[in-house]
Image (tube, rainbow, N blue to C red):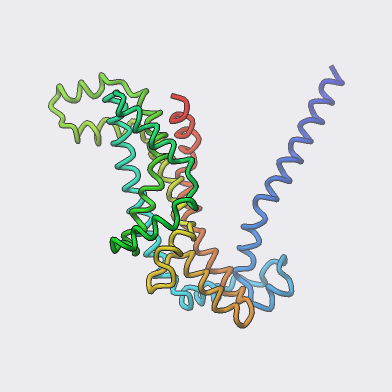
Amino acid sequence: MKSFIRKSKKNGLIRYIILTVMAIYTLFPISFLVINSFKSQSEIVKTPLALPKSLNFTYIINAIKEIDLANSIWLTVLITVVAVTLIVIISSSVAWMMVRYKSNVSSFMLLFFTSSMLIPFQAVMYPLISLFDNVGLKNVVGLILMYGGFGMSMSIFLYHGFMKSVPVALEEAAIIDGASVFQVYFKVIMPLVRPTTMTVIIMNAMWIWNDYLLPFLVIGNGEQKTLTLSIYFAKIQSGQYGNAWDLIFPAVLITIIPIIILFLILQKNIIRGISDGAVK
């Protein structure tokens, strides 16, 4: 019995040590970013791991002004909100129709959507950009449409898996009470698939918010820039005279704060939404 207790304590201690090391490894990049966002250029270069002498917000204010982060934040929020809204509405309605109207066509469409997840973006990158350029959509509107298309396949897969568990009797009862198709969709179906919707929102919002490659290919160094583009071009310009870390660290900190807040608000639904969508 004593040997069992000693072995159990030993295993618990090893488990805590491993978890502590993993937590430090995970939190180190964010901690490094935060402490260096309140330092001058010389402080960052001399003592990058030391805590700042004071919480000086001057560097954050300078980053907002010099990189024009206010406009970049507004454009990134607009692109993310519109693209995610498109993905949620179209994916959920398409998945609902495919579940309720089973046929060879709906089975083929589900296979078509899910198989598109296997195609890497680099394989269609240049043909897609050329096509959108030819039709006059190499701009913010075209960027939103691209995000909507790329985010559709995984979202449909998740919604399709969850909606198979929604009883048809609920929809029939609503229709008998006089509800239209749109009322059934918005007032019966969407509240039931809320965990999956939260998962779709956070997965696509994190990807769109942090994406650099697609905005670079579509809008490039134009007047309108997303947050990632603004930071990249600020880094390029300052790189001619050395890296302006007192500008870059605060800018990156401002960039990640909104998406971290969104993740913390919705994170409880992520695992539940993924497991429900994949298993049911």
> Does 233 sit left or right of 172 as displayed?
right
Q: Position of residue 229 (x, y in %)?
A: 47, 67
> Does 99 sit left or right of 29 as displayed?
left
The quadrant of the image that shows the N terminus is: top right
> Does 136 sit left or right of 264 as displayed?
left
Does 39 appear above or below 165? below
Q: Farthest top residue? A: 1
In depth, the one of 79 and 195 nearer the eye is 79
The quadrant of the image that shows the C terminus is: top left
Q: Farthest left residue? A: 178
Q: Position of residue 70 (x, y in %)?
A: 41, 70
| Number of numbered markers | 0
- Residue 47's quadrant in the figure? bottom right
Q: Position of residue 77 (x, y in %)?
A: 38, 59
> Does 141 sit left or right of 31 as displayed?
left
Q: Position of residue 64 (x, y in %)?
A: 47, 73
Does 163 appear above or below 50? above
Q: Farthest bottom residue? A: 241
> Looking at the image, which residue is at 36% across and 48% down?
149
> Looking at the image, which residue is at 80% across and 29% down?
9
> Looking at the image, which residue is at 49% across and 42% down?
267
